[in-house]
Structure formats: structure tokens, C-alpha cells
Amino acid sequence: MSENQNETPLDPAAVLGDRDDRVYGVVDDPETDVSELEERLRSLDVEVDLDSMQVHSGRSGLDELVPEADDGGVMQRIKRTIQSIGYEGRYLDLIERELKAGHALVAVSVTEENQTAVIAAMKDQGAHDMHRHNKLTIVDL
């Protein structure tokens, strides 16, 4: 068994997304950082879809990302096990630690036109451990 085997109950699809049009990052002070990030994104010269922005914060955010008891059956469990072996597993562990510490995972939908500006705004607001989930890999930002 790999030393990177993930023991977290988090659902990789919930945390990492099943689409490749989002940028993910962790903010340390959800109370302040999320609203300030929304303001930054509104002020950009490019359009950003704030309605699709997702925030999972603290222990309640952790609960949102843990699969229900009916977790899709054997195939879904096999998929989660395979995902947990590689980089995704390490990222899931990081997100779990951050949420337990009271921080928040923020996901913002991006387009080719606004991706650079959104990433810069998130970093300016203090987002860290940022990534974009592409079809075959996770890209650190």
C-alpha cells in the first residue's frame, strides 16, 4: 500500500470537482476573506460568475464534502480509493486539515478570458494551496 494512501472520508469529486472550469483555493478567515474576495471579483474588468462560486467552510464544510451513506456503491468506493493513492489523496488530506482548522475551500468558475484575473484576485485576497483540476491532472497555481 502506498504511503500516500488517503484515509480521509472526503469525496474527491466533491472537493476537486468533476468539471475543469473552476479554480480552487483555501482562505484562512472565511468571515472576512470570502466577502472581500467577492468584492474583488466584482471589481474586475472581466465578467465572473459569482452565482456559481462555492464556499465550504470549517467543520460544516467538511460535512458537505463527505459522501452520504449511499455513496454510489462499490464502483464509487473503488474510484475514491484509486484517487486517494496519488496527488489527489494528498490534496484531500490538506483540505481536510484546513477545514478542521476553520478555514474555507473556495471554488470560482473561470473562463479562458477571466482565469488569470480570478487567480490574481484570489491570491491577492490571501488564497493559498490553489489548483485547477484538469481532465487528467491537478495543476497547482
Image (spheres, rainbow, N blue to C red):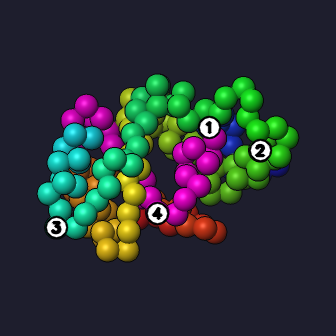
Determine the residue positioned at 46% across, 25% down. 60
- Residue occupying the point 61% across, 48% down: 13
Residue under numbered circle 3: 45
Kindly indicate the quadrant of the structure image that contains residue 30.
top left
Q: Which mark is residue 10?
A: 1
CA gap, disc 1 to disc 2?
12 Å
Which span of residues is magenta-colored? Answer: 11-33
Name the spot of residue 58 as percent of width and height, x first. Answer: 42, 29
Marks 1/2 in contact by CB < 8 Å: the verdict is no
Q: Which numbered disc flags the more N-terminal residue, 2 or 4? A: 4
Distance from the alpha carbon under mark 3 to that under mark 4? 19 Å
Residue 45 lies in what quarter of the image? bottom left
Q: Relative to 118, does residue 16 appear above or below in the rendering?
A: above
Per the image, label 3 sits on a secondary structure element best described as: loop
Q: Which residue is mark 4?
A: 21
In front of the other: label 2 or label 3?
3
The answer to whether any part of residue 81 appears in the image is no
